[in-house]
Image (cartoon, rainbow, N blue to C red):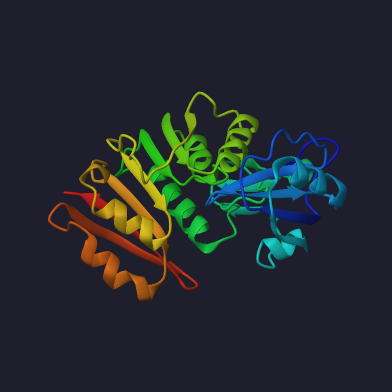
Amino acid sequence: MLRHPYTRYDQLYVYNFDRTDLGQIDDPDLIGTWIEDETAILFFHKEKAELIETIRKRSDATILYEANLNYQDWEAGLDITTFSVPPLTVAPLWEVDKLQLGVGEIAIHLDPSVIFGSGFHPTTRLCLQVITDMITSDSKAIESMVDLGTGTGLLSIGAAKLGVQNIRCYDNNPFACEVAQKNVTINECEKQIQVMEADLRAKLPDTNVDLLVANLYKGLLLEFFNNPDFWNAKYYIISGFVPSMEEELLAALPMDKLKLLERRKSEMWRLWLLARK
């Protein structure tokens, strides 16, 4: 995350360790620690060879790889800048000061960090657009929402800014939860949004809500589709897949319980809007 004195991301210095128990890391240049598959990936604003060697020795860990890359490269070559999904306007923290809103526009201030969900991936933008369309539509009353795999928290914050009062968002990545909580706080949505760390494979949260959003990868979607506890919401936004995956995913849907209301696409990615019968 961005901490004083940093106001934006430039160079990323990345160190991947073969274990997660690295001890306390208190360094002003630390962006965060990504825990995945029993490994820890440390992100810094500056090169940290001496600190990394200290961590390696005290934890008896092995460094799997190191990388130095531009933030834009981390974001797949995209320049993270202000964009709009009317009436929402999403601005990274380094552009907030120059943000000018028109009549009826609603601002979201976002620290995208190095977490999925900055709004520039097509699936995140698709989900945000459908959430906006649903909430601003007279035909669908959305008062509660669950966001599975929240990332930066953008989708939940967008829903909260549009008036949804009861939102629970989950991620199994502690760093993602930390970033999401920061974004919830700076957007003053704490009363509407709960951010929770959870292993969704182990146990699904209560899905008895108006809207469930699952922008995830195919394997996890298939697991959820085969779990009856997943199918308690009124509406579902499902994304994170490409056309070659649709046949297998469609075959796993309990269509006796569902209606496919809409199918959208952006670039190579697809989204479904489903309703429970």
For image coordinates 68% across by 49% down, the residue present is: 61
- Give the quadrant of the N terminus: top right
Residue 101 visible in the snapshot: no
The image position of residue 164, as x and y in percent, is 42, 34
Going by the image, does 274 lie left or right of 178? left
The image position of residue 272, as x and y in percent, is 34, 60
Q: Residue furthest bottom?
A: 244
Q: Nearer the viewer, residue 230 or 174?
A: 174
Q: Is residue 20 above or below residue 63?
A: above
For image coordinates 23% across by 62% down, the residue present is: 252
Residue 234, by quadrant, is top left
Q: Nearer the viewer, residue 149 or 33?
A: 33
The image position of residue 218, as x and y in percent, is 38, 62
Going by the image, does 180 lie left or right of 167? right
For image coordinates 69% across by 54% down, the residue present is: 62
Q: Residue furthest top?
A: 191
The image position of residue 259, as x and y in percent, is 20, 56
Q: Is residue 60 above or below residue 124?
A: above
